[in-house]
Image (tube, rainbow, N blue to C red):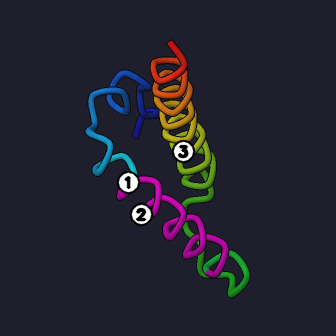
Amino acid sequence: MPLPKISEARELSDEKLAEEILAVKKQLFQLRLQKATRQLEKPHQFRHARHHLAQLLTVESERKRAASQATEE
């Protein structure tokens, strides 16, 4: 499973972006729970989930920054 591309995150609508952020946060919680109970089979999923979450949050902040600059002008 390759790391997700940021271009995929930029194609999402604002609503889908928020839903995806929430889903990835839930996934990270589940992965931490599996790790704590020693049921985690694929530790690389942590890296993928954290990477994807960072991309989604970056896109979200870019959009917020662009919206705030548009309202200032």
Which structural element holds mark 3? helix
Q: Position of residue 47 (x, y in %)?
A: 62, 46
Q: Residue furthest top?
A: 73
Residue 11 sits in quarter: top left
Q: Residue furthest front?
A: 73
Q: Residue 48 appears at what percent x and percent y? A: 54, 45
**In this rendering, would 13 be left or right of 25?**
left
For the record, the magenta segment spans: 19-33
Q: Earlier in the sequence, mark 3 or mark 1?
A: 1
C-alpha separation, residue under disc 3 versus residue under disc 1 = 14 Å
Asked if marks 2 and 1 touch (Cβ < 8 Å), the reply is yes
Q: SS for tag 1?
A: helix
Residue drawn 60% across the image and 81% down it? 39
Q: Determine whether 44 is above or below 7 in the image.
A: below
Residue at 47% over, 24% down? 71
Q: Secondary structure at mark 2?
A: helix
Which residue does the numbered mark 1 point to in the structure image? 20
Q: Would you place residue 55 above or below residue 32 in this image? A: above
Residue drawn at 49 percent across, 37 percent down: 60
Mark 3 nearby-residue class (10 Å; few <14, some 14–19, many ≥20): some
Amino acid at the residue labelled 2 = Ala
Quarter in which the N terminus is drawn: top left
Q: Residues within 10 Å of mark 2 (few under 14, many from 20)?
A: some
